Image (cartoon, rainbow, N blue to C red):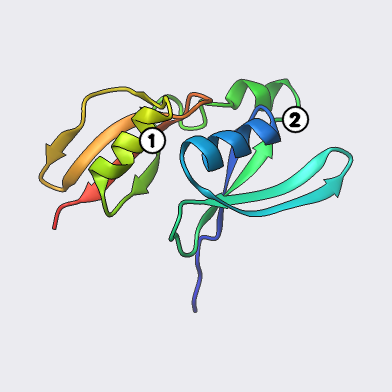
Amino acid sequence: MTQQLSLVALLVPDYDAGVAHYCGDLGFELLEDTDRGDGKRWIRVAPPGSVGTSLLLAQADGPDQAAAVGNQAGGRVGFFLQTDDFWRDHARYAAAGVTFAEEPRVEEYGTVVVFVDAFGNRWDLIQPAA
């Protein structure tokens, strides 16, 4: 049997704001933006060079979903973005105004920093140790 995690839904307050942040500020690629009617869209984004899993940007619908935007992991780091060049991406994100929750640090497993996306979700940017 073969299985693969293909999509992770990420609530955003607005489709266009989600695309602007992930594809603009963070440099992700827009893989698909399909109109589904009634104001719904199917939007998939992924980091450059990514294979397999992508994010499905889901516009919050109703007060419960709106309240969960930016807090999908209950305040913990919920997303992990692995890079092949930590300092390149850290500099790019800093120049784009991305908020860092700490200073970069070198751990036994790699170089890492926690950043907060435009909606409040906490992410690790990590380059694994060689």
Camera-nearest label, 2 or 1 = 1
Q: Is residue 70 found left or right of 126 in the rendered image?
A: right
Residue at 76% x, 45% y: name it.
Answer: 41
> What's the amino acid at mark 1?
Trp
Q: Position of residue 125 (x, y in %)?
A: 32, 40
Say if 109 sits above or below 77 in the image: below
Q: Position of residue 17 (x, y in %)?
A: 64, 30
Say if 53 sits above or below 13 in the image: below
Nearer-the-camera pick, 21 or 63: 21
Number of marks present in the image shown: 2
Q: Position of residue 78 (x, y in %)?
A: 42, 37
Residue at 75% x, 30% y: name it.
Answer: 61
Quadrant of image for the C terminus: bottom left
Instruction: Kindly indicate the quadrant of the structure image that contains residue 69.
Output: top right
State the mark number for residue 123.
Answer: 1
Residue at 83% x, 49% y: name it.
Answer: 36
CA distance separating discs 2 and 1: 23 Å
Q: Is residue 96 found left or right of 39 in the rendered image?
A: left
Q: Is the residue under label 1 in contact with that under label 2 (CB below 8 Å)?
A: no
Q: Earlier in the sequence, mark 2 or mark 1?
A: 2
Nearer-the-camera pick, 122 or 17: 17
Q: Position of residue 84 (x, y in %)?
A: 27, 54
Say if 119 sits above or below 37 in the image: above
Few, some or many C-alpha atoms within 10 Å of disc 1 (few <14, some 14-19, many ≥20)?
some
Few, some or many C-alpha atoms within 10 Å of disc 2 (few <14, some 14-19, many ≥20)?
few
Query: Which type of secondary structure does the marked residue at label 1 adopt?
Result: strand
Query: Which type of secondary structure does the marked residue at label 2 adopt?
Result: loop
The residue that disc 2 covers is 61
Nearer-the-camera pick, 66 or 123: 123
